[in-house]
Image (cartoon, helix red, strand yellow):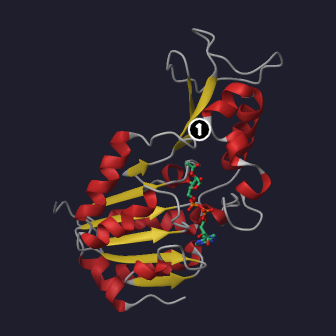
């Protein structure tokens, strides 16, 4: 697990940094990834669970699956990878953390400028009136429904065949375009538009690096690939940046 001095120096001197995370960063918290052996899509068929038609056909099954995933996420904690990104955010003047994860662990770790491209499993809403519904409870007599209008309650996540939230995509693209350094962490980089962000950053002049236990689909386009676990690589990387830049501009009030 090695990163270059170039990466450390660039991070230490960058004003704009963007990071894209995927399921791999939460793997060390105990949340299964989608595509590694034993991953979620091995055990459950996405077409049965993660699309609107499937939900309308069998809302209880889909609600149950998300309830299960919500419980898994709630019973885990952010790991040193999530926490290192909180430290990094503190050091960088303009820092954007773009995540494909819906597990809420970046926010729980304390990251502030988080762009959730695929939603957040902790939020739900009514498919008829749109009312946010974060207080629904098990219902013995059928699927969870809205307290106001009786519509079905769905998780606030992006399903197959659905568009990503427009504002999140725009924010992510803008931060990729202005980034001097872009880190792609724990993602297989096969689901677009997220997978296009590191390449957009590179075309816009950023130094792009990947942290993954194995090369992703876009590893060949990276300026640097760091093979290793996010929870081990990121704390060391941020520690190395700290050695060059011990204090945050933000803390010194120099913005
Ligand atoms: P994947 O499951 O496709 O990929 C996880 C990546 O993390 C793989 O490249 C692993 O090699 C890597 N990995 C595993 N453990 C790691 C660790 N400890 N440290 C670093 N890397 C590690 O997950 P995503 O790329 O996030 O979308 O998947 C993208 C999207 O596909 C998801 O957001 C989801 C899914 O369909 C929706 O649900 C809309």
Residue 178 visible in the shown view:
yes
Above or below: residue 153 compared with residue 149:
below
Q: Judging from the image, what secondary structure is the residue with disc 1 in?
A: strand
Residue lying furthest right: 140
Image quarter of residue 168: top left
**Residue sitting at 70 percent across and 59 percent down?**
32
**Residue sitting at 57 percent across and 78 percent down?**
232
> Position of 139 compared to 83: left or right?
right
Query: Is ligand 1 closer than 8 angstroms to the Cβ of mark 1?
Result: no
> Position of 74 compared to 175: left or right?
right
Locate the N terminus and report the quarter of the image it occupies: bottom right
> Position of 168 compared to 47: left or right?
left
Above or below: residue 69 compared with residue 180:
above
Above or below: residue 221 compared with residue 149:
below
Locate the C terminus and report the quarter of the image it occupies: bottom left
Towards the viewer: 117 or 49: 49
Quarter of image, ligand 1: bottom right
**Residue sitting at 19 percent across and 60 percent down?**
253
Residue 91 visible in the shown view:
no
Q: Which residue is mark 1?
A: 122
Towards the viewer: 42 or 22: 42
Position in image of residue 30 (x %, y %) = 71, 60
> Position of 65 compared to 193: left or right?
right
Above or below: residue 184 compared with residue 137:
below
Position in image of residue 51 (x %, y %) = 62, 38
Position in image of residue 43 (x %, y %) = 79, 54
């Amino acid at each position: 697990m090695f990163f270059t001095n170039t990466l450390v120096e660039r991070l230490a001197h960058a004003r704009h940094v963007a990071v894209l995370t995927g399921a791999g960063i939460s793997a060390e918290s105990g949340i299964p990834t989608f595509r590694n052996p034993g991953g979620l899509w091995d055990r459950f068929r996405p077409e049965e669970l993660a699309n609107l038609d499937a939900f309308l056909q069998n809302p209880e099954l889909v609600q149950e699956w998300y309830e299960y995933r919500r419980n898994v996420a709630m019973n885990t904690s952010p790991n040193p990878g999530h926490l290192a990104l909180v430290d990094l955010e503190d050091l960088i003047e303009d820092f954007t953390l773009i995540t494909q994860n819906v597990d809420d662990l970046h926010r729980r770790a304390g990251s502030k400028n988080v762009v959730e491209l695929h939603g957040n499993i902790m939020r739900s809403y009514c498919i008829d009136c749109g009312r946010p519904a974060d207080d629904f409870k098990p219902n013995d007599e059928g699927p969870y429904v809205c307290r106001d209008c009786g519509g079905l309650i769905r998780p606030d996540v992006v399903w197959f065949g659905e568009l990503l939230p427009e504002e999140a995509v725009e924010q992510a693209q803008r931060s990729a375009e202005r980034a001097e350094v872009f880190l792609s962490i724990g993602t297989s980089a096969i689901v677009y538009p997220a997978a296009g962000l590191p390449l957009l950053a590179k075309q816009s002049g950023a130094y792009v690096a990947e942290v993954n236990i194995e090369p992703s689909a876009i590893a060949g386009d990276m300026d640097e690939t760091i093979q290793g676990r996010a929870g081990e690589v990121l704390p060391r990387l941020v520690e190395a940046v700290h050695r060059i830049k011990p204090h945050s501009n933000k803390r010194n009030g120099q913005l």
